[in-house]
Structures are given as C-alpha cells and as structure tokens.
Amino acid sequence: MNWLDDKRDQLSKWIYAEWQDGVLLRGDSLEIMPLLKPIDSIITDIPYGISQQSNGLRSLDYGEWDHLNNMELVWMEAMLRMIASTAIIFCGKEQISNLISYAKEKKLITKILIWHKPNPTVLNCQHHYIDATEFAIYTKKPRAFFKPGYKHNVFEYPVVHSSQRNHPTEKPAQLITELIGDISRPLETILDPFAGSGTTGVACIRTGRQFICIEKEESYCAIGQKRIDDEYIRLAEEARQLDLFQEAATTYRRRSNHPRTR
C-alpha cells in the first residue's frame, strides 16, 4: 500500500503480510492504531467478553482473546479517532448501551444493526429462546457517505458452517461485503482492528477497497493471510476465465462476419 511507505519504519515490527491493496498487522490494536493515518471507515467485531457467562448450563469459552471485560469504551474511543466517515462495530448485547451512549456524546449518528441467522447455533434451547440474532453499532459522522438510502437495519445471512469456520465468532463474508458496499466507495480504506481470520480483508478484495487488518493472535494471522491469498488467487482465476471467454467470443464474431463461400 502506497500510503504505508511513510509509516513503514514505525510499523515494520507489526507487518505480518502485505498486498497491493492491504496489510495485515500482528499486534495490539491499541498500540498500532495511534500510528496509522486517519482512514475512511471501520468494520470490526470486538471481543464480547461472554466466554465465562455459561450460568452453569453449558461451558462457553471462545478463548483467551474473549476474556477482556469492560474494554469496549477504550476501543471505541481509539477507533473513533481514526475514522473520517463511518464505523460498524459488532458487539455483545451487554456492550450496546455503553457504545451507543458514547457515540451520542460525540454527536454522531447512531443506529443498531441486526444480523438475523436463519441457522443459529442451538445452545441450551431447552431452557430459553434460541438466540438467532447478533448486533452491531452503526455510527457515522454528519454527511458521511451512505449508499443505499431507505434501507432497513436487518441483515439475514446464515452462520458459517462449522466445517468451514475459521474463527469461533466468524461473520459471513457476504454480510461484511454488503456492509462495506453500504458505507464506502471503491478504493477507500477499511480498518478492522480485531481482524480474527481476515473476513474483512476478503470482503474488501471483493469490493475493490483497500484494507488494514490488525490481529493479535499469530494463529489467526496465519489463517487470515491464507484466506486473503486464496481470495486474490480466486479473483485472478476468474479474470483469466473471463479473458478466455471474451477471446473465444471475439473469434466467433469474426468468423460469423466472414461466411463461407460456396
């Protein structure tokens, strides 16, 4: 990424992988974000801090990264310093109130987005309703770009199947792709300070955006790098196939324009 050149010395120890349109940084986002230039928008999925809340019904532990409690306002403050336009922050139900209150204090336009899952994870459903939704805080600065116009705030996408899931709380790439298209223009830069397995990077490639992914865990950096590499390979193969098709179509048209003489 060209904009990274004048920050390369400061960021070099965190650069895990780099592509023409993006970079994956391994480290603590609170350390790294102050070193970055302001970016256009953020889409991220912060740790929910719910791993220990099993209430004796069933063990629920997403890993060490999810055992950080009461940090959402610290992360929110750091992220809002970065953006020129919009932030979409997936969060736990217990975090919604704090995040909305903070955004409104900053005079930002704020809404709740709902991801409805038609195939939710069944967890203790014999004791209560099945959780089929997750939530995100949508907050933007006045006059920030919003493409759709008159669009409702409920998005329905199936949960990533366990056999294809790369991260315990992975969001569908199609969902993130739609959100990126709603809040940003092509070639703008999207930051994900809690990148997990790199879904935001994959979605940015599909939509022609630049991306900065920050992830603390080395294992997820490795997965994210592979997913992003694979997405570039997939697009290159699609482009190759399209070129072959167009070449064949051109050849066919030329032959059609020169009928055989008897």
Image (spheres, helix red, strand yellow):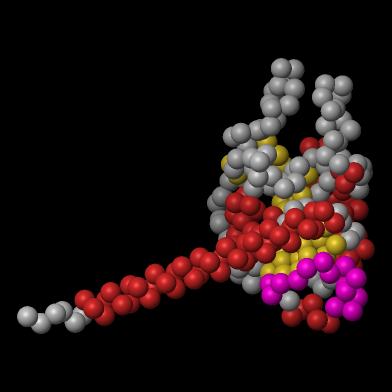
Quadrant (top left/top right/bottom left/bottom right) for the N terminus: bottom right
Rendering quarter of residue 6? bottom right
> Left or right of 75: which side holds 235?
left
> Left or right of 229: which side holds 61?
right
Q: For the point 72% across and 48% down, which residue is it? A: 166
Quadrant (top left/top right/bottom left/bottom right) for the C terminus: bottom left
Between 36 and 79, the one lying in front of the other is: 36
Q: Position of residue 234 (x, y in %)?
A: 57, 63
Between 217 and 110, the one lying in front of the other is: 217
Between 174 and 69, the one lying in front of the other is: 174
Q: For the point 68% across and 58% down, which residue is it? A: 227
Tell me where the magenta segment starts and ends, as one range: 8-21
Residue 9 is a magenta residue: yes
Q: Where is residue 17 in the image (x, y as percent from the top left)?
A: 78, 68
Residue 240 is a magenta residue: no
Q: Where is residue 158 in the image (x, y as percent from the top left)?
A: 60, 40
Q: Is residue 241 visible?
A: yes
Rendering quarter of residue 40? bottom right
Q: For the point 87% across and 24% down, which residue is it? A: 55
Rendering quarter of residue 210? bottom right
